[in-house]
């Protein structure tokens, strides 16, 4: 069945470092892909999304590109801040469904 | 702003109790979801509802049931709570269209003792 695999955390970085969180997926056809973020004590909120191959989603300095050939949707940010410390979830919505399938989440810790 | 509200942030219940988790959304969304979040396992779908009185089992429905009598409200019921149901429970809603995001509540951390 459809699934999402993302790198285990925690990822620990100093402020202003470059961030990459890897995400790969298995799915039939062309699913939609999402990154959600969960700040401490809160629910999930959408960070960015891409709905077709080669689309780039971006928000708050974060970017991810939908790569069909490598079935990947890696999250990147050029310069992280302490306020980016959170858990990041990669997710997919299978073709023609409203459901979301999530990865296991990656905790990011940014230190000053 | 879309708002998904879960009735409790924290709950402590005893083994064997019947537990109700309530979720209300204010955006007239057709779809509502209950997820369970556990460390190392991510979010797992318990139940999904795509319309009033309609429901569909997710990946881990055992030990749970749901009720959707009104469009805005989706309840998760633990018929007889057990310690392995100690977890964070997240409710979400979305409109009935593909490629759209889901909106999440703040979560209910349930502890069963």
Image (cartoon, rainbow, N blue to C red):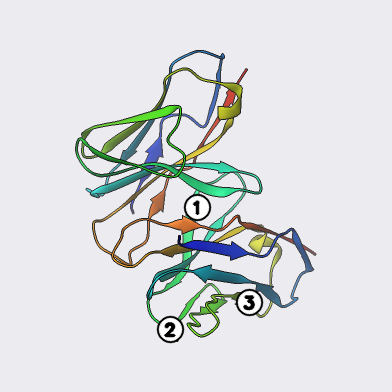
Residue A55, numbered label: 2
The residue drawn where x is 38% and y is 75% is: A30
In depth, the one of B52 and A101 nearer the eye is A101
Q: In this view, does A32 lie to the left or right of A42?
A: left
Alpha-carbon distance for marks 2 and 3? 17 Å
Report whether mark 2 lies on the same chain as mark 3: yes
Label whose residue precedes the other's in the sequence (2 or 3): 2
Residue A16: percent from left, percent from top: 74, 75
Characterize the local packing of mark 3: few (<14), some (14-19) or many (20 or more) Cα atoms within 10 angstroms.
Answer: many
Q: Nearer the viewer, mark 2 or mark 3?
A: 2
In depth, the one of A102 and B74 nearer the eye is A102
Label whose residue precedes the other's in the sequence (1 or 3): 1
Residue B19: percent from left, percent from top: 44, 20
Check the image and name the residue furthest to the front.
Answer: A1
* Disc 3: which residue: A77
Q: Quadrant of the N terminus of chain B?
A: bottom left
Snapshot quadrant of residue B65:
top left
The residue drawn where x is 50% and y is 52% is: A44
Alpha-carbon distance for marks 1 and 3? 19 Å
């Amino acid at each position: 069945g459809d699934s999402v695999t993302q790198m285990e955390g925690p990822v620990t970085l100093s402020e202003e470092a470059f961030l990459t969180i890897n995400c790969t997926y298995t799915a039939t056809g062309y699913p939609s892909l999402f990154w959600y973020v969960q700040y401490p004590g809160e629910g999930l909120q959408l960070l960015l999304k891409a709905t077709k191959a080669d689309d780039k989603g971006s928000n708050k300095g974060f970017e991810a590109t939908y790569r069909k050939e490598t079935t990947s949707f890696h999250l990147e940010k050029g310069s992280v801040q302490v306020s980016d410390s959170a858990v990041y979830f990669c997710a997919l919505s299978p073709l023609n469904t409203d459901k979301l399938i999530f990865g296991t989440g990656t905790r990011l810790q940014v230190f000053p | 702003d879309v708002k998904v509200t879960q009735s409790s942030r924290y709950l402590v219940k005893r083994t064997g109790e019947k537990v109700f988790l309530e979720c209300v959304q204010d955006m007239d969304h057709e779809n509502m979801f209950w997820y369970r979040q556990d460390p190392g396992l991510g979010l797992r779908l318990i139940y999904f509802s795509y319309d009033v009185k309609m429901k569909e089992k997710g990946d881990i429905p055992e030990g749970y049931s749901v009720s959707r009598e009104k469009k805005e409200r989706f309840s998760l019921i633990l018929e007889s709570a057990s310690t392995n149901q100690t977890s964070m429970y997240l409710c979400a809603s979305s409109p009935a269209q593909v490629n759209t995001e889901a909106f999440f509540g703040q979560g209910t951390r349930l502890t069963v003792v």
